[in-house]
Amino acid sequence: MSEPVIAMKKHCSVDVEAGQSYWWCSCGRSASQPFCDGAHKGTDFAPVEYIATETGNVHFCGCKHSAEGPVCDGAHHNL
């Protein structure tokens, strides 16, 4: 599998609503970061669904290297 594009070297804070689905861009090519806009077509990547368990702010991964999937784990500090 190829490496994702580093969209940003930081997290992306988003207000989410409990019970709602959000489709996180895993390839880094989307113009709608941190969410998918279909730019992954033709790559090995696919969007990852994040379902908010509570209403609040989530730090989505912007570098696409988080071991926690869509949620930032600080991996951008090592890039």
Image: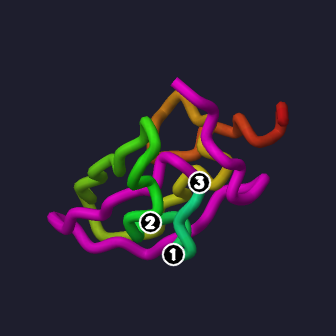
Residue type marked 1: Ser
The numbered mark at residue 28 is 3
The numbered mark at residue 35 is 2
- Residue at horizontal 74 percent and vertical 58 percent from the top: 8
Q: Position of residue 25 (x, y in %)?
A: 46, 55
- Contact (Cβ within 8 Å) of mark 1 with mark 3: no
Q: Position of residue 7 (x, y in %)?
A: 68, 58
- Contact (Cβ within 8 Å) of mark 3 with mark 2: no
Residue type marked 2: Phe
Q: Magenta segment: does it hold 10?
A: yes
Residue 65, placed above or below residue 62: above
The numbered mark at residue 32 is 1
Q: Nearer the viewer, residue 55 or 51?
A: 51
- Residue at horizontal 46 percent and vertical 63 percent from the top: 39
**Spatial distance from mark 3 to mark 2, Cα to Cα?**
9 Å
For marks 3 and 2, the one nearer the N-term is 3
Mark 3 vs mark 2: in front: 3
- Contact (Cβ within 8 Å) of mark 1 with mark 2: yes
Furthest residue in direction left, as rendered: 19
Instruction: Judge from the rendering whether residue 56 lies leftward or rightward of residue 77; answer left or right.
Output: left
Q: Position of residue 67 (x, y in %)?
A: 54, 28
**Spatial distance from mark 1 to mark 3, Cα to Cα?**
10 Å
Element class at badge 2: loop
Which region shows up in magenta? 1-28
**Spatial distance from mark 1 to mark 2, Cα to Cα?**
5 Å
Q: Within 10 angstroms of label 1, few (less than 14), some, or many (20 or more) residues? A: few
Q: Nearer the viewer, residue 53 or 36?
A: 36
Residue type marked 3: Gly
Residue 39, placed above or below residue 70: below
Element class at badge 1: loop
Instruction: Judge from the rendering whether residue 60 lies leftward or rightward of residue 8; answer left or right.
Output: left
Q: Within 10 angstroms of label 3, few (less than 14), some, or many (20 or more) residues? A: many
